[in-house]
Amino acid sequence: MLDRRLHLHLVTWLGQWPAGPGLHVVGSRRRARPAWDGRLRPAIGVRAPSGDTVLSVPPERVEAIRALARGPRAGLLAALPAAVGQPGWAVHQDTFRWSVAPAPLPEVGQWCAPTDPALPSWLRLFDREVLVVRDDGGGYLAGVGIKRHDAHGHELAVGTVPAARGRGLARRLVAQAARRVLDEGAVPTYRHDPANLASARVADAAGFPDRGWESFGVYPP
């Protein structure tokens, strides 16, 4: 059975879940509102291993996109940016993971404000504390930010500087941050490009198994 927190996250984030067999295009006002970073996400889809798929788009775009969805999936994805009014944007397809039992790895990071100028620019996008590992001189080595999509699902994003890779920092940070998300009453999620094998290994080691779920969407360039 699907974890209740994940179910509530999908219902809230997409506008509907479960979908039933096949692809279901649904309208959600959330697609016209800024996401966690202040930018729009005008199309977001999630596909379960069963093939059940929900594609969430602005309500006024539903009928046009349902017409596109009657054709091949590749054609839908290619046409999706223009169909939601963002022809210059790209479609991302990711492996979608979550965890209710993060790996019991030792904690390695410290929580700090995202406004710290020593942090990389991508971590400074977050509006709440981020989890960071620094070297002995205070330099940034690795960090995790939490994308709070809604009250029920919080997505983890992790990054490590090249010189610090291979030390297991990312997996420990992800597991540590996942425990915090669970303590807050939400389910931690993790998405990555299927071709990103390093990110897949981090997810596996942190307790985020690949259950065969996928996500896709239209994102700013």
Image (cartoon, rainbow, N blue to C red):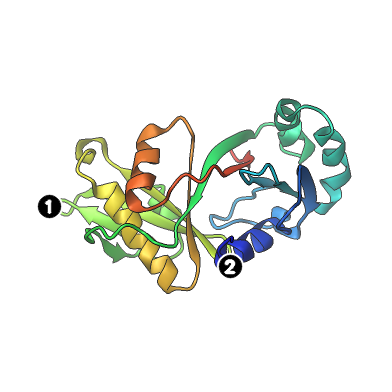
- Horizontally, residue 15 falls left or right of residue 65, namely left
- In the image, residue 70 lies at what x, y percent? 84, 33
Residue at image location 31% in from the left, 64% down from the top? 112
Position of 66 relative to 29 (above/below): above
Position of 79 relative to 138 (above/below): above
Sequence order check, earlier mark of 2 and 1: 2
Q: Which mark is residue 164?
A: none
Which residue is denoted by mark 2 in the rendering?
Answer: 4
Residue at image location 51% in from the left, 46% down from the top? 211
- In the image, residue 45 lies at what x, y percent? 67, 45
Label 2 sits on a secondary structure element that is helix
- In the image, residue 68 lies at what x, y percent? 83, 33
Disc 2 to disc 1, C-alpha distance: 43 Å
Which residue is denoted by mark 1 in the rendering?
Answer: 137
Q: Nearer the viewer, residue 142 or 71?
A: 71
Residue type of the residue flagged with mark 2: Arg
Of all residues shown, which one is farthest toward the front? Answer: 1
- Horizontally, residue 153 falls left or right of residue 103, namely right
Label 1 sits on a secondary structure element that is loop
Residue type of the residue flagged with mark 1: Gly
Residue 132 picture quarter = bottom left
**Whether residue 118 is visible:** no
Residue at image location 32% in from the left, 47% down from the top? 205
Residue at image location 17% in from the left, 54% down from the top? 138
Of all residues shown, which one is farthest toward the bottom? Answer: 184
Q: Quadrant of the N terminus?
A: bottom right
